[in-house]
Image: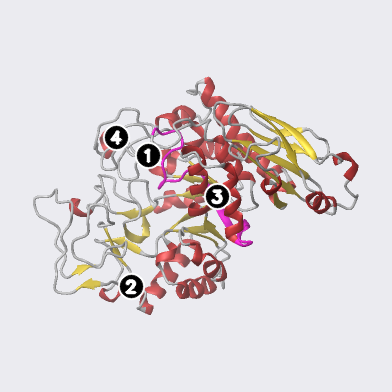
Amino acid sequence: MNIYQLFPRLFGNKQTEFRLNGSKAENGCGTFNDIDNTALEAIKDLGFTHIWLTGILKHASESTGTHPDITKGRAGSPYAVTDYHAVDPDLGTMVDFEALVNRIHDKGMKVIIDFIPNHLARQNKGFDPCNFYYCEGQGFVSPRQVAEQPYEEYPAKATGNNVFAPNPSINDWYDTVKLNYDEHDTWEKMLEILRFWCGKDVDGFRVDMAEMVPVAFWQWVIAHLRQDYQSLMIAEIYQPDLYKPFLDAGFDYLYDKVGLYNTLERVLCEGHEAKEISEVWKDLHDMDDHMLRFMENHDEKRLASPQFVGNAFAALPAVSLSALMNTGPYMVYNGQESGEDAVGEMGYSGDDGRTSIFDYCHMPQHQKWMSGGKFDGGGFDEAQKKLFGYYRKLLYFRNEHSAIIEGKFYDLMWCNPWYMNFDPQFVYAFLRYSDSERLLVVVNFNRTEARDVEVKIPHDALALIGKSRANEFDMNDFASEMVPVHLEPSETKVIDLDSRGVVFGNL
């Protein structure tokens, strides 16, 4: 499963001129219709099986007329939903959305959208007083007061990120209010919303801040939903102690942010040793294959941004490792494959290394692939062509090799310490193997230096992969138990242990 996170407002925007804090008319905005057959064919050709359409629900914005004091930026946060049963008018109509879903299905891909159960916009439709928490006897005070007439709310509702006070800070989710799950009416409304979108042929949901909603609700709602729909359920979650309860409740996959993503960030940017990656799978206790892996999404800094790695190629070891380490889904954020660097201030979001989700803006590097709607990479320079080609090769590799699709994982770091011809500071090695294939994956995180290493494969690993096929593995081929590997800076290399040939490496 390869997921392409597509933010329609950004993805289809062809406007190249930009004005700080500009309006939709000034800065442009992508629509559902911009995601046409040409665009979808290009996405499929990259190797994607699923598209997560991000920010499609009607939400607080200048276009929807929400009060400026409770709207983040002119385009607004897509997670401050004003109507769960409507699409955002900036993107088109419900008919346009339904046509897009049909186009995606016609290309053989599946559709995921956001489900946002914890909070919604302060100005919202379809909910009753019992569905919220309140700060009794106190009026709401917005930390952002830009309108002549301030927004009035009395009594103040609790803010979405669990701020039970009338005066949230500018760093809080002050544009949202928290839903009350002490009331069963809230449960019923959420189930109806899920069923509504399943009725639009949506195949699955990425659940925003799932951990802020009780586990009991998820047990109930997923069981009820799956009486009629076999929807894919992915939880955004950051508390490892909740991983097992959420999987037991029915979620298919969970965000692996605090585990693999954060560890790779430390290895890439803070000088941590590559061998620390081993702690990720150990901490997961056999839940590894239920983790959604990624190195970019709308919440995180762009890999190529100055605030993160600063170089899309230097980030490829982390991209490759996270894509090849387990059988779970892998996700790429639109623009990542083109080296989007999010340089400069767009407006409300500031210059923080992220492509703004609050402002009307565009993705300059992505537009070079989009090439006016041809999606032929006509604007790419040679480096971007190479980067784009790498992502395509990696995604196809995931979908073409049984050792990756369904194979098992064996970490080789325990038997490759410093005192051998190995470098666990920068090099990470593991096996992936199935009944028909045995692969050795070796990654070099050093950006400037090549590495010549000898990877030891211990006897117990050889026995495991030898028994994984009907025709017994010839142990004599590995009498030395050592596999020599040359790695260029920032290179990932995959070696087929049967042929000893390199089946994946730098372009």
Q: Earlier in the sequence, mark 1 or mark 4?
A: 4
Mark nearer the viewer, 1 or 3: 3
Residue at 33% across, 63% down: 119
> How far across and how far down the image is residue 444, in percent?
61, 34
User: Which residue was labeled with disc 2?
Assistant: 180
Compare marks 4 and 2 and give the one earlier in the sequence. Answer: 2
Q: Quadrant of residue 275?
A: top right
Q: Indicate which disc residue 345 carries.
A: 4
Residue at the spot 38% in from the left edge and 79% down from the top edge: 184
Name the element at disc 1.
loop
Q: Is residue 380 above or below residue 184?
A: above
Q: Earlier in the sequence, mark 1 or mark 3?
A: 3
Tag 3 secondary structure: strand
Q: Where is residue 264 shown, x and y percent of the image? A: 52, 44
**Earlier-in-chain disc, 2 versus 1:** 2
Q: CA distance from mark 2 to mark 1?
A: 32 Å
* Residue labelled with disc 1: 355
Residue 401 to residue 189: above or below: above
Cα gap from disc 1 to disc 4, whole angstroms: 9 Å
Q: Position of residue 464 (x, y in %)?
A: 80, 54
Element assignment for label 2: loop
Q: Spot the residue most to the left.
A: 148
Disc 3 versus disc 2: distance between alpha carbons?
A: 31 Å
Q: Are there few (<14), some (14-19), or many (20+) residues within 10 Å of tag 1?
A: many
Gap between marks 4 and 2, in whole Å?
Answer: 36 Å
The boundaries of the magenta stretch are: 285-306
Left or right: 43 as drawn, with respect to 117: right
Left or right: where does residue 136 sit relative to residue 438? left
